[in-house]
Image (spheres, rainbow, N blue to C red):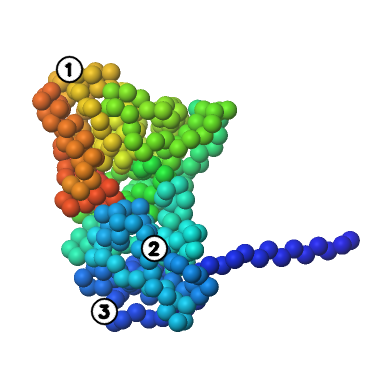
Amino acid sequence: MRLLSILFVAAAPIACWTQAAPTPDCHPAPTNLGGSPYPCIHPDLRVTFRVVAPDAHKVLVTTNNSDSGIGKGPVELTRAQDGAWTVTVGPVVSGFHYYWYVVDGLEVPDPFSESYFGHNKELSGIEVPEAVADYYAIKDVPHGDVRIHLYHSKTTDAWRRAYVYTPPGYDRNTQTRYPVLYLQHGANENGTSWTRQGRANLILDNLIAANKAKPMIVVMETGYAAQPAATFSIAPAAAPPAAGRGQGYSAFENIVISDLIPAIDSAYRTLPDREHRAMAGLSMGGAQTLQITLTHLDQFAWIGAFSAPIRNFDAKTAYNGVFTDAAAFNRRVHLFWIGAGTVETAMHEGAKSMHEGLDHAGIHNIFFESPGTAHEFLTWRRDLADFAPRLFR
């Protein structure tokens, strides 16, 4: 028998060498891998990026968020004699930000940072800590678990994966049943985003430990779906007018109502009724939440829209006229919560217009503003920290 040996050789534009130590006042980002010193954060929140690419001719660093402070566009790094490329940017806004390098035209992640699923691919991320906020920090409190739950969807005739947060004591308190929050990510992210980028499990751990939130199960699914034999497509980042149903939303709506909720209720100790079931989501997930909950009020009594793309809101016609009978709506829905960051102009204006329209129509609602934040996870962490304590009370 002949033994055939094949060697695959790939160009490596970035050399994963040991990083040189930064200046004493520049501290490694908490999202760095393996104790790597870069990227590092200065006391004034400037950030120094450094990558070793001795054979490269041009290296840029860029981000999806032009309001982050990393740069309004790609920022060019400067090459040193040892082949290391560096640049200092900022000050950078506190919170979580995606970033990546462009090396001679090729987009590559930073080999020294954690990777996160965003923009429908794996990207690097940097966490710039807030000076005073610790509501999403790891603390010495009881912690819940994040589990992977596989279930079969009749809607798509395929297996799907949900990420399920169970609160502290779930496995010990075997007679206790819990309310459920269905929590959705934004466009081009997935079911891992709320715990990886959003730190939802830590936020809930800390709120529950402080007796500020009820212990609850949180279910995080990936919000894309297609009917069998249909062409798969990512749901658009911008939702249709609030009165309508978006292309690509209906299959996921059917999954939530017909497949996901029954699967969770059968596998976990839930309180399986609308009084103990909530749904919320950010951006695209906020639009999905509004569509699903407002057309299925028999299933949900608690609703949260975080930075949802809301346009042309009219309380008289939106969602098949669900708001026209204010008294009936207020009896059925215990919380209708709308939030946005003050710097995400379009989302903030849409959320505010919905809030004002609902107020005028006599619909009870909460409008929450995250000061100084844009379309980013710091906005949504703050949203969750305000929204979750109001649930199931």
Give the label, 2 or 1, closer to the camera. Answer: 2
Q: Which residue is mark 3?
A: 25
Q: Is residue 233 visible?
A: yes
Q: Which residue is mark 2?
A: 61
> Where's residue 155, x and y in %?
50, 27
At 27% from the left and 27% from the top, the residue drawn is 242
Of residues 109 and 366, the one nearer the viewer is 109
Foreground pick, 99 / 278: 99
Q: Residue at x 34, y 67 (%)?
A: 30
Q: Give me the residue at 50% from left, 31% from top.
A: 226
Which corner quadrant of the image does residue 97 belong to?
bottom left
Which comes before the other along the chain, label 2 or label 1?
2
Q: Residue 323: percent from the left, percent from the top?
A: 20, 21
Mark sitting earlier along the chain (2/3):
3
> Looking at the picture, which amino acid does disc 2 mark?
Val
Give the residue pinned by disc 1.
325
Of marks 2 and 3, the one in the foreground: 2
Query: How far apart are the alpha carbons under marks 2 and 3?
Result: 22 Å
Instruction: Determine crowd level at label 1: few under 14, some 14-19, many 20+ residues with C-alpha closer than 10 A.
Output: few
Question: Quick one: quadrant of the N terminus?
Answer: bottom right
